[in-house]
Image: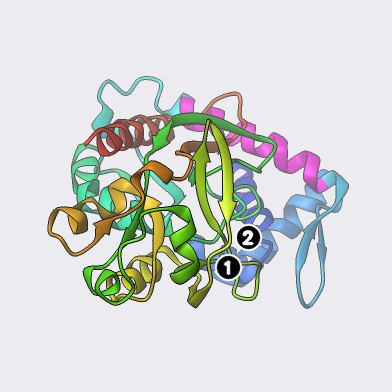
């Protein structure tokens, strides 16, 4: 295995913190992965990884080498594509993460268009409501909806999502249509938490430009966006969601908007990626395509 291949192996092991997962992702035997890293350490005269039976961690030298490898490999990608005259020649793998609803409703239905334009690109698409760690899990870019908490990443603001309050017709028939905030005392929400057992959310609304909240009980709590919408459609309570996620249900009358004067604050949408001096052309092409699709999605 040459030096560049060994560096790619090391980077994947570092990002996944696992020789087994790195072997699976690269389609190589685990023994080849371990040997490549061992030979790389011998060549450098430095220990790059702490290995235990449970986990793999970067040493201090390993962290410095990892950062330089990422930059170098990105530059190699750029050099290799320097004389390519058309976008169709872009090659390589991209690992992307985004919220479940965005993947299902926006990206996957339109992804064939991107793949036909760039047949040499392979995409690993993660769609989960869990906030992945882009660096440690080896993602090239991620989409975030909501206030950003990550540091050490470059963020591109894509826009904001208008929010709405919704309930099903069956729920309204049973509990009535709330006309004021005080009416919510006789209602239920579907609570959403990222981890079951965490503190549930409250009913949020803007008042004179200030975000406020009031506590509304719930009989059902869920931990993903699909279950959140399905619970509302089943008549289990009120939800607060981006308008684009439920527009079709509202148009068909399967959901009804309520308390339109008390909407939550719009949610920002951001595209995040690790800081690198040179991004690969395939990643730039995907990010530009995704940005266009998200802008069109939010404007629809």
Q: Quadrant of the C terminus?
A: top left
Q: Is residue 17 above or below residue 52?
A: above
- CB within 8 Å, label 1 to label 2: yes
Number of labels in the image equals 2
Mark 2 crowd level (few <14, some 14–19, many ≥20, 10 Å Cα) = some
Residue under pointer 1: 21
Q: Which mark is residue 16?
A: 2
- In the rendered image, is residue 147 in sight? yes
Residue 87: horizontal and vertical position, in percent?
27, 28
Residue range in magenta is 62-78
Task: Give me the C-alpha separation between circle 1 and circle 2.
Answer: 7 Å
Q: Residue at x 45, y 70 (%)?
A: 186
SS assignment at label 2:
helix
Displayed quadrant of residue 237 = bottom left
Q: Is residue 130 above or below residue 93?
A: below
Q: Is residue 279 magenta?
A: no
Residue at the farthest left position: 252
Displayed quadrant of residue 12 = bottom right
């Amino acid at each position: 295995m040459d030096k560049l291949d060994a560096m790619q192996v090391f980077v994947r092991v570092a990002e996944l913190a696992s020789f087994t997962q790195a072997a699976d992702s690269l389609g190589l035997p685990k023994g080849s992965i371990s040997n490549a890293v061992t030979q790389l350490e011998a060549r450098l005269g430095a220990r790059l990884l702490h290995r235990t039976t449970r986990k793999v961690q970067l040493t201090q030298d390993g962290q410095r080498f990892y950062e330089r490898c990422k930059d170098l490999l990105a530059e190699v990608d750029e050099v290799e594509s320097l004389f390519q005259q058309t976008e169709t020649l872009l090659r390589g793998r991209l690992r992307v993460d985004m919220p479940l609803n965005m993947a299902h409703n926006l990206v996957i239905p339109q992804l064939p268009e991107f793949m036909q334009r760039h047949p040499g690109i392979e995409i690993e698409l993660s769609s989960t409501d869990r906030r992945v760690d882009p660096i440690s899990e080896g993602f090239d870019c991620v989409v975030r909806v909501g206030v950003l908490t990550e540091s050490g990443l470059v963020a591109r603001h894509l826009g904001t999502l208008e929010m709405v309050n919704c309930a099903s017709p069956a729920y309204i028939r049973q509990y009535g249509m709330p006309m004021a905030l005080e009416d919510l005392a006789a209602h239920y929400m579907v609570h959403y938490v990222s981890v079951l057992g965490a503190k549930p959310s409250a009913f949020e609304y803007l008042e004179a430009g200030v975000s406020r909240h009031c506590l509304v009980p719930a009989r059902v709590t869920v931990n993903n966006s699909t279950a959140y919408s399905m619970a509302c459609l089943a008549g289990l309570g009120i939800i607060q969601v981006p308008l684009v996620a439920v527009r079709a249900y509202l148009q068909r009358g399967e959901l009804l908007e309520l308390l339109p004067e008390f909407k939550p604050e719009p949610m920002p949408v951001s595209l995040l990626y690790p800081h690198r001096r040179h991004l690969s052309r395939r990643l730039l092409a995907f990010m530009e395509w995704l940005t266009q699709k998200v802008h069109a999605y939010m404007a629809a």
